[in-house]
Amino acid sequence: MPKTQAQQLTVELDSDTWRVIGIGVQKAGEVYVHLASTTRSNTQKNGEIPVQVACFIDATLLKPVGDVIEMITHKTPRGKTLTGVVAFWLTEDAAKEIDPYAFRKTHDDRMGWFIRDQHLHKLDRIAFIPNKREI
């Protein structure tokens, strides 16, 4: 399956826009992230390298780029097929608030939270998904 634009995360921090390179441990509403600046860089022998930082930030600052979310299916061990999305930008608490039965799922080599399709209407108010959503 092709990668979607919603898999890219950005953060507005210190009047700069940062691209999320990695997400680490989550605790008390904060998440540890590795960020690369989209506007500032350092010149090195091999070219321009973005300024990078690793820090804890408020988990609600994470937001997806783009307005396409790919619907996928998941087959349960009992053979039932679930339809939904994998939200890479959500914390566990936010995912469980949207869908009480949300679970960790790997999609396109990235770990996220599987949100079942009957709960997608809750994403706009909790997960900072753009209003124009093509599903």
Image (cartoon, helix red, strand yellow):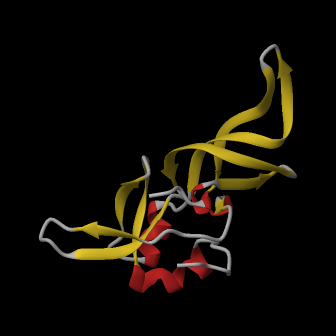
Q: Name the outermost residue toward the left.
A: 78
Q: Which residue appears at 68% of the width and 61% of the height?
A: 65
Q: Position of residue 112 (x, y in %)?
A: 44, 57
What x and y, as percent, mark residue 113? 42, 62
The image shows residue 27, relative to residue 71, as above or below, that is above
Q: Residue furthest front?
A: 1
Q: Is residue 133 toward the left or the right of residue 94 in the image?
A: right
Work out which quarter of the rendered image holds the N terminus and state it. bottom left
Front residue of 108 and 62: 108
Which of the 4 image quarters holds residue 131?
bottom right
Residue nearer the viewer, 64 or 46: 46
Tell me the residue at 44%/62% (across/down): 92
Query: Viewed as shown, does residue 56 lie left or right of 101?
Result: right
Residue 24 position (above or below residue 51): below
Q: Residue 33's quadrant in the figure? A: top right
Q: Residue at x 60, y 58 (%)?
A: 59
**In this picture, residue 49 sits left or right of residue 32:** right
Viewer-proximal residue, 73 or 9? 73
Residue 52: image location, x then y, percent:
73, 33
Q: Name the residue located 61 percent from the left edge and 79 percent from the top edge.
A: 133
x, y (%) of residue 79? 14, 71
**Numbered marks: total:** 0
